[in-house]
Image (tube, coloured by chain):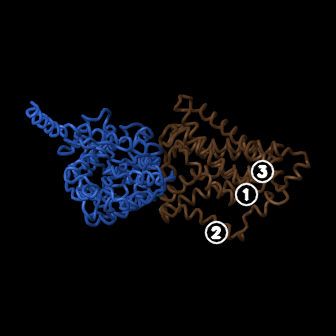
Amino acid sequence: MLRLLAPLAGAFLTLAALLAPAHAEEEFKIGVVMSLSGGFVAAAKDTMDGVQAWLKARGLPGKKVTFEILDDETNPVSAVNAFRRLAGNPDIKLIYLFINSSSALAVKSLASEFKVPIVSGGAADALGLPADPYLFKVAPAIKDFMTVLAQYAQKKGYKRVALLNMTDAFGQNEAKFFKELAPQHGVEVVAAETMGVEDTNFNAQLTKIRAARPDMIYNGGASRVAILSWKQIKQLGINQPLIVTQAAISKSFFDAIGGAKAADGLMTPIQLGSFGEATGGDTARLYKELKAAMPTQVVYFATFGYDVGLITAEAVKNSDGSREGLRNALEKIKDLPGVNGPITFSAQDHTGQNYRSIAIGKLVDGVSVPAD
Amino acid sequence: MDLFVFFQLLLPGLTTGCVYALVALGFVLTANVSGVVNFAQGEYVMLGGVLSAALLDAHVPLVAAGLIAVAVCAVLGAAQERLTLAPVRHAPHFIRITITLGVAVVLRGVALIAFGKDPLSLPGFSGDGIFELFGAILPVQSLWVWGATAALLAATYAFLKHTDTGRAVRACSINLQAARLMGVDAERLTLLVFAVAGATGALAGIVITPIVLANWDAGLSYGIKGFIGAILGGMRSPAIAVVGGLGIGVIESLAAGYISSGYKDAIVYGVLIAYLLLRGGAFLFGRCALAGSAHEP
């Protein structure tokens, strides 16, 4: 009897050992430095919502994704401290940075010290170029937005363009890149004026712009500057096509100018995800997925979060799961479809999305639709 | 010279200059009686704008919102003097000036928390239309700014020249000790002047907000430019300080139009430096009744 039971027990134990791994998922731990307090809270939360939507819609097959989240308090020093703590944890394979550009740049300075791959938010060009081996930026660079602007001017036959940019680094980079790109697109910059963040009177700048007789005007102002310059443009009877920066469009902008309808026709270069399903193609398909998985309305930063998830899945699929393996797989990503457009990294350039993920949108009743 | 362009630059500059002029007036009046430069003066302009806009959003009628904002800023001005400057009346100048800087920071912080970071607006008092003057296109609200400034300046002139209290204020600015010996209650006058300065700043903020919106951080720029205007007036003469404030607004606008919008602030501060150098480097605190025997312990 015992001689019969022993083989049966052995067979049973072998079967149990073979079956058990099929039900136990491997944990994939992601460290997240995000703004849980401070000025960047809303954007960080929206981004995380997008990641959660990706998890719900797709996730990592066969893996249980867990997050360890630390607050950067919208502060570069706290961001660096939080990064150090997460990067020092060997269980964490990948780190997300859902923080503003200043904090992300602070983390970039020591990204290679811990050799953990990072997928980062932030708009600053310097995050992706020059490339740090371990930090991968997702959003396009300022130069990409200006490339789309120049392409649009060329397409519409606008030969003379006037610029009105902020005096800060962002605004000056916009002006610099556009001036470099303009000749390549058959465009002449006929006026390049500047505005300070505290300025309230733009008569001087707008008078010079009007005198230059441009075919198109680009206004890089945001917040109060965007509102006041828009009002003064209307008061002075300047009717040329007006393109504003993405950052200008907000609820307070619509409230101050008399409602969303007052801004009808206003154009802005924005990422494809902002158009929702209107663009078609991969953007529409992925946007639909995101929308189905989100419990609330889809906003821009949520589309960015979904793209972060897609990048993660691609890297995990093509790696051995180690930090170095994930880093190498991230760098090999080419034309990966994203909600906001295709994502490509290279050894020299860690800016994931470029001008292909941007289009000129036109406001219709407060909503952006692709411009003609 | 294209006259249309010139007036398109001059007249809006004059509008902004009106606010600087009223801030400069506040600086001079408070400095004359207290001996200290009140660097919180610009914040009363900001408060007038944000408070009246917030009250209007809360369905308070525009006129009532404006009056309440002016009254609140008058009380705040008096409170600033009584609570932060009166206790240190005999402290060195730099301590009292630093305290006013601290008050400015506190007022900005409170405005940010109370009213948020987004700009607030007021409708134009006669609508949001435009009009043309010498070929320049201006918002109708500009007329309200010019009118309010002229009325306030006329009232201030009448007060200083033709009332006993006004004469007492002028006496304090010439020689505080002598004024005290003549029976002038300098402490009460200081309280009154700070209240008036707060109210004046608030009124300037209310009339300019329909044109430039109101923001928690707008006061700093008004304060600095108004201070330059006051310096050009020697920190002594209200009339010259007003002209200085108007001049700064015009210079700023003309510089942006004819030289470069990027350098307009540098040009304005350059005017200040040039003026101080021309006056032999003497920051006029060292020469007028504000320093030395008049106000020091």
Disc 3: which residue: B34
Query: Dot 1: few (<14), some (14–19), or many (≥20) neighbours within 10 Å?
Result: few
Secondary structure under the numbered disc 1 in the rendered image: helix
Q: Position of residue A309 (x, y in %)?
A: 27, 46
Q: Which chain hosts label 2?
A: B
Q: Mark 2 belongs to which amino acid?
A: Ala
Answer left or right for B130 relative to B160.
Answer: left
The disc labelled 1 sits on which kind of residue? Phe
From this view, report whether residue A46 is shown above or below residue A220: above
Letter of the chain shown blue in the rendering? A
Q: In screen coordinates, is A191 left or right of B154?
A: left
Query: For the residues marked 1 and 3, what is the alpha-carbon distance in whole angstroms?
Result: 13 Å
Residue at (58% x, 36% y) in the render: B52
Question: Quick check: can you spot residue B38?
Answer: yes
Q: Amino acid at mark 3?
A: Ser
Residue visible at 49% across and 55% down in the picture: B8
Q: Percent from the top left, x then y, of residue A28?
A: 28, 46
| Residue A242 seen by the camera | no
Task: Check the residue under mark 1 and report the chain it is in.
Answer: B
Question: What is the secondary structure assignment of the residue under circle 2?
Answer: helix
What residue do we see at 47% from left, 51% from top? A78
Q: CA distance from mark 3 to mark 2?
A: 27 Å
Of the residues under marks 1 and 3, which one precedes in the sequence?
Answer: 3
Closest to the observer, B63 or A291: A291
- Does dot 3 land on a helix, a strand or a loop? helix
Q: Nearer the viewer, residue B216 or B171?
A: B216
Give the colour in which the image draws chain B: brown
Q: Is residue A10 left or right of residue A265?
A: left
Q: Which residue is mark 1?
A: B94
Which residue is denoted by mark 2 in the rendering? B274
